[in-house]
Image: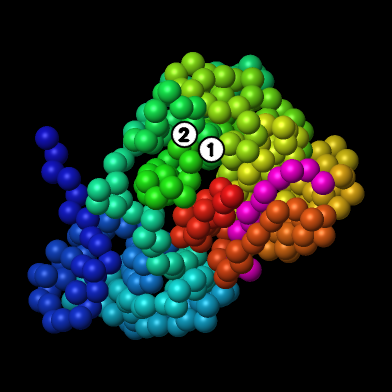
Amino acid sequence: MSTPPDLLAVSDLAAALAGPRTNADAERLVERLRQTAGADKLAQGAWAMTDELDVVWAIAAPGADRPPRVVSEVGHPFERELTRLGDTDVFLTMATLPEGAALRWHYELAGAAVGGGQTEVYRSHPDGRRRPGVLAGELIQQPRWRSQVFAGTVRDRWVYVPAAYDPSHPAGTRVFQDGGTHYKDHVPPVFDNLIAAGELPVTIGIFINPGVFADTTVSNRSFEYDTVSDQYSRFLLEEIIPEGEKTYRLRTDPESRAIGGLSSGGICAFTVAWQRPDQFRKVLSWIGSFTNIAAGPTLREGGHNYPALVRRVPKKPLRVFLQDGENDLNHQAGNWWLANQEMASSLAFAGYDCTTVWGKGCHSPLHGRAILPDSLRWLWRE
């Protein structure tokens, strides 16, 4: 049996910076750092670690005659010289940033920009952690699903059943796109805490990954999520939810069904509710891609059309929560920050039950995770 890696936490690296150390100590620390960060990422200058508001940056810089600096390119202004660890070729620094700070950064080494990444910092929400005395539900991986609506695709999926679920009382349903990547490890404690507090009805979580074509690694994500059509809603209503109903009693009224996602998964959530408000009425979108990704043959068919549609089409009975940050993406398909603001403006103009939380963030789930408990409270309020 192999020994598990001796991984580091931010607190370990803070302690290393705080006090004197021998070269032997420094070498041991660097070995642990390589296990934690990955030797390639350290060499490429592409690694940082966060813990709440604390951030550590480290880079391997063999032959450096002066310490590298980490420098902010976009977002929160920041510049800091790194400290060499003993006689090793690894340099390290740490900083405590303001709540909600976000930045894209790189290293400056020998007069050149090296590597880089993006970092955001948020305090953990108390309801995002397991609470003593609150019973935990069960996350159950399901057999891979072979879809007929998205012919030729297979996908991973999970179901989260709260401890409070009682088969004699049907439960609500909450669907998450990109469920295995971004949600299944973060949502369950929030569900349990809010259900125990009576702030969320007993709700079963369905976490679904986008499809890949069978026997390949080719993803169907953008087609499934970014296309403005009823296909994904049919996939849920004809395949995924009926499959869940074979095992669990689920409510069928649209007020008990919610859907959420981030980026393309966020616009997908809105599209499902927009197409089928008789089935889904609560939408959670983080950094939603209300942009022209699905341009189609005309180059005009994407989700950038939603703000105009919302203003023109008779109001639908939807409740919508939007989150985005001012350092979100800006490229050929559109400007995410502006697109989300335009979407919010249109929803408000048309009289929708909509709220927004704006921040400084990049294209990342971190802000959404930090506010998830309060987002769910707002969506499920009476």
| Residue at the image point whose x is 19% and y is 74% from the top | 16
Q: Provide residue 235's location: percent of width, then percent of height.
A: 64, 25
Could you tell me the amino acid type at mark 2? Ile
- What's the magenta region? 315-327
Residue drawn at point x = 30 percent, y = 51 percent: 130
As helix, strand or loop, the secondary structure at mark 1 comes to strand
User: At x 13% / y 82%, what residue is drawn?
Assistant: 20
**Disc 1 designates what residue?**
174
Residue 247: give x, y in percent of width and height: 45, 18
Task: Tell me if 21 is positioned left or right of 252 in this view.
Answer: left
Asked if the magenta segment contains residue 337, the reply would be no
Q: Measuring from the top left, give residue 90's x and y in whole percent.
A: 28, 70
Q: Quadrant of residue 279?
A: top right
Residue nearer the viewer, 256 or 80: 256
Marks 1 and 2, how far apart in space? 6 Å
| Residue occupied by mark 2 | 204
Q: Is residue 265 above or below residue 160?
A: below
Q: Residue at x 17, y 54 (%)?
A: 6
User: CB of mark 1 within 8 Å of CB of mark 2?
Assistant: yes
Residue 294 appears in view: no
Residue 285 spot, x, y in % from top left: 62, 50
* Left or right: residue 204 compared with residue 175: left
Report the side of 7 relative to 25 (left or right): right
N-term mark: 1 or 2: 1
Query: In the image shown, does 312 or 42 lie closer to the viewer?
Result: 312
Q: Secondary structure at mark 2?
A: strand
Q: Residue 42: in sight, yes or no? A: yes
